[in-house]
Image (tube, rainbow, N blue to C red):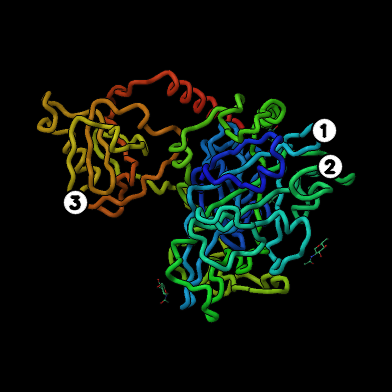
Amino acid sequence: MRDLLPLALLLAAPTHAFWRLPCPAPLTIERLDPIVSPGKVSAHAHTILGGNGLASNMTYNTTQASTCSSCTVIGDNSNYWVPALYFQHKNGSFESVKQNGGALVYYLQRAPKGVSMKAFPPNFRMVAGDPFRRSDQNDTEQSAISYACIDYNAPGTPETHAFPTRNCPNGLRQQVFFPSCWDGVNEDSPDHTSHVAYPVGGYNGGKCPDTHPVNLISVFIEILWQTDKFKDFWNPDDKNHPQPFVFAHGDPTGYGGHGDFLNGWDIPLLQRAIDTCTSNSGNVEDCKEFKLRPDKQAEGCVLENNHVDEVVTGVLPRLPGCNDVTPGPDRAPLPSGPPTCGATTTLSNKTGTAASQPSIDGWKYVGCGTDSTSARAMTAARSASDDMTNAKCASFCSDGAANKQGKGFKYFGTQYARECYCADEVRKEAMPIEGVPGTCKMACSGDGSQMCGGYGVLSIWQRAGGDDGVTKGKSRKRFEEHVARHAVKARKIAS
Ligand SMILES: *[C@@H]1O[C@H](CO)[C@@H](O)[C@H](O)[C@H]1NC(C)=O
Ligand SMILES: *[C@@H]1O[C@H](CO)[C@@H](O)[C@H](O)[C@H]1NC(C)=O
Ligand SMILES: *[C@@H]1O[C@H](CO)[C@@H](O)[C@H](O)[C@H]1NC(C)=O
Ligand SMILES: *[C@@H]1O[C@H](CO)[C@@H](O)[C@H](O)[C@H]1NC(C)=O
Ligand SMILES: *[C@@H]1O[C@H](CO)[C@@H](O)[C@H](O)[C@H]1NC(C)=O
């Protein structure tokens, strides 16, 4: 995603400082909206990024109890979300559209010269865009919501406020620019927008109105949807199957695009970054205030259990929550009551982990690590079979036969449903990170109820009572210390 610079933004203000915060994967996709529907199941599905403290009813403190984030700046446990996108097939079924990565969140220093910008206060939250719009309102709020039809062969294609009506060969980029002027008093408002405003001269920078005099840093989210994967399922000239992409809230126009931000920053850190990170390269690495977590760790930061126990991806007969498609041009009606198609209205009470593992005598589950074919996590012995389970791998790695020294190994790991690896030492970068659940969600080929790693990830087990065979590097150690400190702080806040 990082190569897709928003041309318009760069040209608009080439001298303004900014940084791009990468969020390599969604934290979760579900019918949750802690701003608009606190403590409830939301009316529509969102793709949500950021800290795993996410909860249906959350405060700033909740964000600070995160143990990881799907965005890479350590110290930003904010949550960012936009509606999920679906493709409606000609037969009426909906199919979820995949994202390319997670999101790129731009932090743009767009205050007028000489005006200082403030970090968001605790509990600050806001919504950009209006989900009920189905036609172009030709106002600042509308300009802040846009779409780029990505076509490497036709760069510079103008951005639109509606969904493009042609296939975008390299995907559809959804863009949400948040208001950057604040009333200086309210961290939220009943409509979640009136405590903030856009600058006088337009959405993307300038002087704040007198009603909202405090300049905040501007937040701008980009999500790249793989709409091109559906190119063979529609034809722009087919009048019986008009523009087929639809947001989770039933919007097939794009005018109802919106985004939500809930502040979870380490506020002094954000303020220091605002004051000192004045590079206009956009590279987050150029901001010396920031420490970054590796992409793999951010990708592994996924919720173990969703708050709403229902399927919202794949092919579905209805949009999640059974929202109707409302093409407008009038404003979409408010839902008249709870969904009538049997969609759940209660939050899940599951507390177990999706990756919970069976108990195996003499072994303990360490967590979900990462692996790659170019630098294997465990290299001493391996096997694979179509009836693999964790116990089977344990027994292979315990058996003196696998180990030339005639004794069992200290670690084993299962991967890609059917592979088994053993070692006395695990490559340090491959070890699971405390607080990062990981994506070991592939069922074992020999037992569908337990997990045997996944693509590029490994379910790692350690011989119980054995010493730690991991060789620790300096940076690794620093990171672990940080995580440990953070966990203590998080527990304090949560209790
Ligand atoms: C959410 O928070 C509000 C305000 O503190 C409270 O009234 C409500 O009961 C909470 N709901 C849940 C489900 O925790
Ligand atoms: C509609 O078409 C899609 C794509 O071919 C297919 O996956 C889905 O199962 C179909 N739905 C029904 C109800 O037949
Ligand atoms: C949009 O608004 C501008 C200025 O407010 C006006 O000049 C223009 O004609 C409007 N366009 C449409 C399509 O209404
Ligand atoms: C959790 O929810 C299920 C289904 O709604 C219910 O049967 C169960 O009693 C609940 N468990 C707890 C501990 O509340
Ligand atoms: C949040 O945490 C701070 C510091 O631990 C505490 O003083 C404050 O009361 C908490 N606020 C809420 C709303 O729980």
| Lateral position of residue 488 relative to residue 179, left or right | left
Query: In x, y percent, where is residue 233?
Result: 44, 71
Front position among marks 3 and 2: 2
Disc number for residue 115 = 1
Check disc 1: other Cα within 10 Å, few if <14, some if 14-19, many if 20+: few
User: Which residue is labeled 3 in the image?
Assistant: 387
Mark 3 and mark 2: Cα distance apart in space: 65 Å
Point out the tag, 1 or 3, that comes first from the N-terminus.
1
On-image quarter of the C terminus: top right
Note whether 488 is above or below 178 in the view shown.
Answer: above
The image quadrant where one finds ligand 2 is bottom left
User: Which quadrant of the figure has residue 216?
Assistant: top right
Amino acid under disc 1: Val
Query: In x, y percent, where is residue 383?
Result: 17, 41
Query: In x, y percent, where is residue 344?
Result: 54, 65
Amino acid under disc 3: Asp
| Residue at (32% x, 40% y) in the render | 459
| Residue at (57% x, 67% y) in the render | 246
User: Under 8 Å from ligand 3: the CB of mark 2?
Assistant: no
Query: In x, y percent, where is residue 88?
Result: 50, 71
| Residue at (64% x, 49% y) in the render | 57
Observer able to see residue 494: no
